[in-house]
Every structure is written in structure tokens, then in C-alpha cells.
Amino acid sequence: MAGASIIDGKEIAAQVRREVAAKVAERVARGRPAPGLAVVLVGNDPASEVYVRNKARSTREVGMGSFEHRLPASTSEADLLVLIADLNARSDVNGILVQLPLPKHIDPVRVIEAIDPAKDVDGFHPVNVGRVASGAKALAPCTPTGCLILASSVQADLGGLEAVVIGRSNIVGKPMAQLLLSANCTVTIAHSRTRDLPLVARRADLLVVAVGRAEMVRGDWIKPGAIVIDVGIQRVAGAGGKGRLVGDVAFEEVKAVAGAITPVPGGVGPMTIACLLQNTLQAAEAA
Ligand code: NAD
């Protein structure tokens, strides 16, 4: 068997970034200000530091303004809310992203709800969650939007496909299911309490996996020819004591059965920042 085609998330994300850069240049040529993205990091979680640095670099690369706010872990919720109110009021800031997780003494729900929904480029504010659910124009969460672009790169019209999403988080699983419903798929959401997960997964023409368990999905869970989108990313011990990154899908096994599959790394990961930039441009254009 020839095996699945590999969906090149790096290249597709680069293409999205090029499109955003071209639209930003065109906007600036029209005499409009460059869109601006503010990223707020509270504390110094090493993974979050890397994400924030990458987001800021990518923002500048497409010609947007990047505003980084690094606050100590001891910052009070009240002080963070004051900063958000200030960013809400600034006309040069079109997108506001508060890097999660926040320190334990800060309530993430209160913080997310304080962001102006028109600047909520993560798509986590209840107004945007509701708009996505009702199929209205919204700032949709970046990772599931990226997954949808990757799946559509294999098959432009996903209408009528049996789609199974494994994972029901607010950040990935639930909004993914909503976006697939809007794309006219027949959608099943599976999760930790689903009975006979392999049987449910085998129904899928399109399988999206966002669980956070290394290589959980095996080759015999896959319908031959299915499109498989792997959101998971975990570091596991590799040969020679060096760590290697793997997804929620046992790549080699699944590749032998699927029609198309995203690799880890280089699949969903690069799409998240590309879609964040797309959302920031959308927010600026709507302002
Ligand atoms: P989460 O922990 O919030 O949610 C995991 C979901 O998986 C839960 O809904 C749970 O019900 C389900 N689950 C747990 N165990 C299960 C099992 N044994 N069988 C079936 N379902 C099970 O995680 P998340 O934020 O949705 O992230 C999931 C994965 O995706 C993680 O590995 C995360 O690092 C990765 N992720 C990647 C990106 C990216 O940009 N590439 C973005 C977000 C998340």
C-alpha cells in the first residue's frame, strides 16, 4: 500500500502568513494603520515564553505591530484587568492575547471575559464561542481553524463527511466540532468517557485527535482512506536519551491505512500562529 499523503502544515501555514502579509501591505498602502497584536504573559513558564516569543516574531514578520507585556507571576488579577482595560481602549491594538495558563491566583474566565470580544483573537470569549456555535461571523479559535484549513487542503468540500473529534476541550475539541458542523460534516465528539473509542474512530472519514496522550490512536482505529488531523504534541524519550516529539496518533501505523495525515511536528502546530495573525487582521479590518 502506498500509504497516506502527508499534509504539510509548515508550507500551508507559510502560505497563510504570506496572504496575511500581502493584505497588511495593501491595507497600509490604503493609508490605514498596520494591525497591532498585544500578547500578555504573566509569570515565566518556559513553554509560554517560547510561544510568546514566536508569536511576537511572526507578528512583526507580516508587518503588524507587536506589543509584549511581561508581568511578574505575583501580578494581581486586579492589575491584570487594568492592563486589559487599557489594551481594550487603545486604537493601535486590534488583538489581545493572554497567554494561558495563568498563575493559580488569577481566574482565567474573568480575564477572558474582560477582553473586548472584537479584540479576542484567541476566540475564547463567550461572545465569540456563541457566534461560532450559531454559525455567525466570529473570531474563531486558532488551532481548530488551522485544522479545518489542513483538512480542506485535502478535500475542499468537507460536506457530508463523517467527522469524529476525539477530545472536548474548550480550546480545541468543542470549537473544532462546531467548525466541522458549519462545514456540513456529520459530527461526533468522543472523549474520555466514550465507550469503544476505536469503533467510534473507525466511522470517521475525517478524524481530528486532541487528547494529549502520546500515540493513543492506533492503525486499526482508522477507516481506510480517512483524513487524520493530529493536534497532540508530547515529548517522549527517544533513541540515545534524546527526547522526540510525537502526536496523539501512532504515525507510522496510521499512515499505512489513512488517506492523508498531519505529521508531528510540522502539522497542526505551525497553523495556530498563522491563524492568530489571520484573526488579528480580521479584527483590524472590522474595527
Ligand atoms: P485538554 O487536556 O484540555 O483536553 C483533552 C481532552 O481529551 C478532554 O476533553 C478529554 O475528555 C479527552 N481525553 C482524555 N483522555 C482521553 C482518552 N483516554 N480517550 C479519549 N479522550 C480522552 O487538552 P487540549 O488543550 O484540547 O489539548 C490536547 C492536545 O493538543 C495536547 O497534547 C496539547 O498539547 C495539544 N495542543 C496543540 C496545539 C497546537 O497548536 N498544535 C494547540 C492546543 C493543544
Image (cartoon, rainbow, N blue to C red):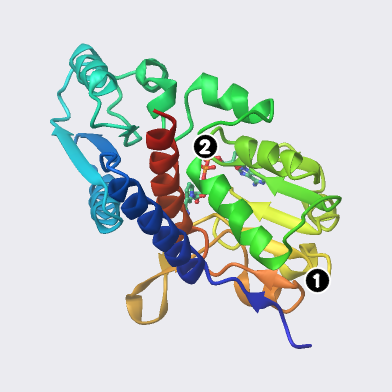
Secondary structure type for disc 1: loop
Percent across and percent down for residue 26 are 36, 52
Residue labelled with disc 2: 171
Task: Locate residue 117: give its quadrant.
Answer: top left
Q: Residues within 10 Å of mark 1 (few under 14, many from 20)?
A: some
Residue labelled with disc 1: 225
Residue displayed at 54% across by 37% down: 140
197 lies above or below 173: below
Task: Locate residue 41: give its quadrant.
Answer: top left
Q: Are marks 2 and 1 in contact (CB under 8 Å)?
A: no
Q: Is 145 left or right of 48, judged from the image as shown?
A: right
Residue displayed at 19% across by 39% down: 67
User: Does mark 2 have its CB less than 8 Å from ligand 1?
Assistant: yes
In this view of the protein, which residue sits in the foreground, 82 or 47?
82
In this view of the protein, which residue sits in the foreground, 146 or 195?
146
Mark 2 vs mark 1: which is more N-terminal?
A: 2
Using the numbered discs, state the Cα–Cα distance from disc 2 to disc 1 in whole angstroms.
28 Å
